[in-house]
Image: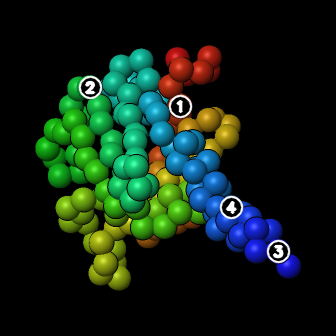
Amino acid sequence: MHWGFRLRVLLVLILIPQITHADIFDRMTGSFGLPDVPSESCAANPVYSSFSPDRGRIRFAWVSPVPSYTGAKITAYGGTVVRVEEDSILMLRDAETRLTEAGPPVLWDMRATDDPDGYCWHRLDWDDGRCLQLVRCGTQANS
């Protein structure tokens, strides 16, 4: 076989997972709101999610402070991307103090949703059907 052909095939095989993962990062980047929490809705105070260039870090930011699980008011927090799948991103929140019953820190799964367009937060130690739905801001249904 010709080396040029082999190199092209190798590059395609290497890039396919990155292309798939780029899609999920694109889907999870942007402004999102909690439709059932008026103070954190798209209209009032959406959260903006973004990723570092190497896709190893995630950041969430709000214009106005929101309550944190610690009781403090925050305008941003970050996390480390632990695993990426076609339709979800698993992350460990920075300075996470909550522990699962088994002992390790809580991990969060951002599961992409289509109807509504957005994502659903799921803690890995929760029952599979439990999650917190966020909707993408700017669509007719939630703008």
Residue at disc 2, secondary structure: strand
Q: Which mark is residue 70?
A: none
Residue most extreme to the right: 1
Identified at 39% across, 59% down, the residue is 56
Q: Identify residue type, mark 3.
A: His
Q: Describe residue 52's horizontal placement relative to residue 97 as left or right.
A: right
The Cα atoms of the two marked residues, 1 and 4, are separated by 26 Å
Q: Quadrant of residue 125?
A: bottom left
Vertical position of residue 26 compared to residue 63: above or below: below
Any part of residue 39 in sight: yes
Any part of residue 86 in sight: no
Q: Identify residue type, mark 1.
A: Arg
Identified at 53% across, 20% down, the residue is 138
Vertical position of residue 24 compared to residue 106: above or below: above
The Cα atoms of the two marked residues, 3 and 4, are separated by 22 Å
Q: Are marks 3 and 4 in contact (CB under 8 Å)?
A: no
Quadrant containing the N terminus in the rendered view: bottom right
Q: Which residue is mark 2?
A: 63
Q: Which residue is mark 3?
A: 2
Mark 2 surroundings: few (<14), some (14-19) or many (≥20) residues within 10 A: few
Q: Which mark is residue 136?
A: 1
